[in-house]
Image: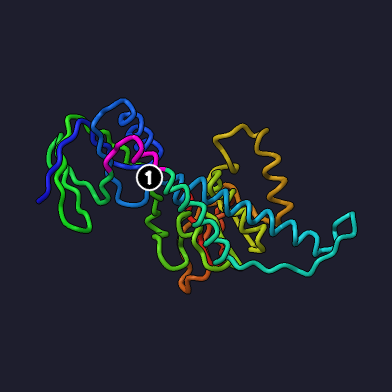
Amino acid sequence: MKEISCKLLVIGAGPGGYVCAIRAGQLGVDTVIVETGKPGGTCLNVGCIPSKALIHAAEEFEKVAHLAGGKDPLGIKVAAPTLDLAQTVAWKDGIVSRLNSGVAGLLKKAKVKTVQGWATFRDGKTVEVETEIGTQVIRAETVVIATGSAPVELPFLPFGGPVISSTEALALAEVPKKLAVVGGGYIGLELGMAFARMGAKVAIVEALPRVLAQYDAELTRPVLKRLGELGVEVMTGAKAKGLSTKGDALLVETVDGKSTKIAADKILVTV
C-alpha cells in the first residue's frame, strides 16, 4: 500500500478545488489534489461549458432553419437543414477535452501532485484513494473538501431509460422528437430551449407558480416570450407524478388537480 504525505490535500478538482490547489502550489505549499474523473468539475465537464456549446450549435441550426423557411428579408434561401447530434456532441467534447488539459497543465505548473481515484477518509487527516493501480494512502496536515454536486434523482422518476439528467442530455446521440423537462429553473430552460431550436417538441413542467421563480418576474417575461416563439409548452403549478406504464409519457397533475400525460421520448429532470 503506497503512502505519501503533504501539507495540503484537496479532494475534488472542480472550480473550487483546482483553484485552491493551484494557488496553494503557487505559494509554495506542498499540495496534492484527488479527483475521480477529469479535472474541471461539473461546470467544465457536464455543466456550464458543454451546455453553452450545445446552445451555440442549436442557435446556428435555428438560423439555417429560419433561412430554409423563406423568412430571410434578403431573399436568401437554403434547403431544410439536418442535424447530426452525435457529431455536435463530439465537437462539444473536443472543447471540454482541451479545457481539461488546460486545467491539468495549470496544476502541473503550480507543482500540484494529481492523484486520480476515489478518496475515502480513514481519519481526519488521512485518506485512502482507490486508483487503477491499487490503494494509495495520503496523509495531510490540512484537508479541503471540494466534492461539488450531483444531479438530484426523484424517487418517482429514477434515472434510467427515458428519464435523464442534464449530464445525459449533453451526450444524446440524436435529438428527441418529444422532450418533457421537469423543473423550470435555468438549467431546464436553457436545455429545453436548445432542443426546441434543434426541432424537438418541448414541454416544461414547473411545480411553482412561474418558471425562474428565484428571479424577479419582470426579468422572466422576455424568457416566457421566447419560449412561446419556440413553441415550448410551459405548465406552471403542475407536479410531475411519474412515468407512464409504457414509459412513453410523463404523468402530471395540473394546477387544477387534474391528471394528464405528456408524451415524451426523453424526460429531463432538472430539479
Q: Residue at x 19, y 58 (%)?
A: 133
Nearer to us in this view, 172 or 53:
53
Q: Which residue is drawn at 48% across and 68% down?
A: 244
Nearer to us in this view, 109 or 53:
109
Amino acid at circle 1: Ala
Is 53 covered by the magenta stretch?
A: no
Secondary structure under tag 1 reads: helix
Side of 102 relative to 4 (left or right): right
- Residue 227, given in percent of the width and then of the height, sits at 68, 50
Q: Confirm whether residue 263 shows in the render.
A: no
Residue 26 occupies which quadrant of the picture?
Answer: top left
Side of 99 relative to 17 (left or right): right
- Residue 268, given in percent of the width and then of the height, sits at 50, 57
Side of 6 relative to 110 (left or right): left
* Count of residue discs: 1
Dot 1: few (<14), some (14–19), or many (≥20) neighbours within 10 Å? some
Residue that numbered label 1 is attached to: 104
Nearer to us in this view, 206 or 224:
224
Chief SS of the magenta region: helix
Q: Residue at x 25, y 38 (%)?
A: 32
Magenta residues (range): 103-113
Q: Confirm whether residue 214 shows in the render.
A: yes
